[in-house]
Image (cartoon, rainbow, N blue to C red):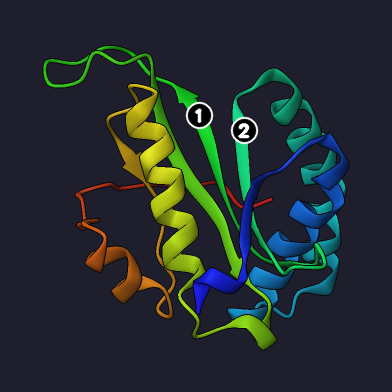
Amino acid sequence: MTNDYLIRLATHDDVQQIVTHRRRMFEDMGNQDTEGLDRMVAAFGPWVADHLASGLYKSWFACTADGTVAAGTDAWLQDWPAGAYDTSPYRAYLLNVYTDSEHRRKGLARLLVKTCMDWCYANDIRIVTLHASDQGRNVYESLGFTPTNEMRTWKDR
């Protein structure tokens, strides 16, 4: 079914589409904090525009024949110090994996994540990470992603 879609790299003209996907992704995962989502959108738009322009952010879309964006996947290239097993200067963090509801269950997320991974590996980015939603975990595991020992802390607003 994915043959009915064209894959394209996003441009600066697509910033609003990327922002919309991010918000919808969080809403679909159950986030109902409208004020928090509004703050996120207001801050994310300029950030993603800047990172797209610098080349440190890549975004791919699956589009219908008429150009309608059906799904998207993004990669943030994070500056990373060399380590014993990976000396590449960047790691890729995948985010905003989102498919519009009418286009789900057609393999678009898998196709886009694989496209992103292939681009990363072809550009000497050896480590690709993401945080999986419950809905996406099986897709990511089938593509070779495995859990890590990451820990985190954060300060509330």
Q: Residues within 10 Å of mark 1 (few under 14, many from 20)?
A: many
Name the residue located 43 percent from the left edge and 80 percent from the top edge: 135
Residue 123 against residue 6 in the figure, above or below: above
Disc assigned to residue 2: none
Disc assigned to residue 57: 2
Residue 135 against residue 114 in the figure, above or below: below
Q: Position of residue 12 (x, y in %)?
A: 83, 35
Q: Residues within 10 Å of mark 2 (few under 14, many from 20)?
A: many
How far apart marks 1 and 2 lie (CA) works out to 6 Å
Q: How many marks?
A: 2
| Badge 1 or badge 2: first in the primary sequence | 2
Say whether residue 17 is left or right of residue 3. right
Q: Secondary structure beneath disc 1?
A: strand
Is residue 30 something one can see in this rendering? no
Q: Position of residue 144 (x, y in %)?
A: 21, 57
| Snapshot quadrant of residue 91 | top left
Q: Nearer the viewer, residue 33 or 116?
A: 116
**Which residue carries the number 1 mark?**
77
Q: Nearer the viewer, residue 54 or 118?
A: 118
Residue 93 against residue 36 in the figure, above or below: above
Q: Which amino acid type is shown beneath numbered disc 1?
A: Leu
| Snapshot quadrant of residue 80 | top left
Asked whether the beta carbons under mark 1 and mark 2 sit within 8 Å of each other, the answer is: yes
Q: Position of residue 21 (x, y in %)?
A: 72, 63
Q: Nearer the viewer, residue 94 or 116?
A: 116
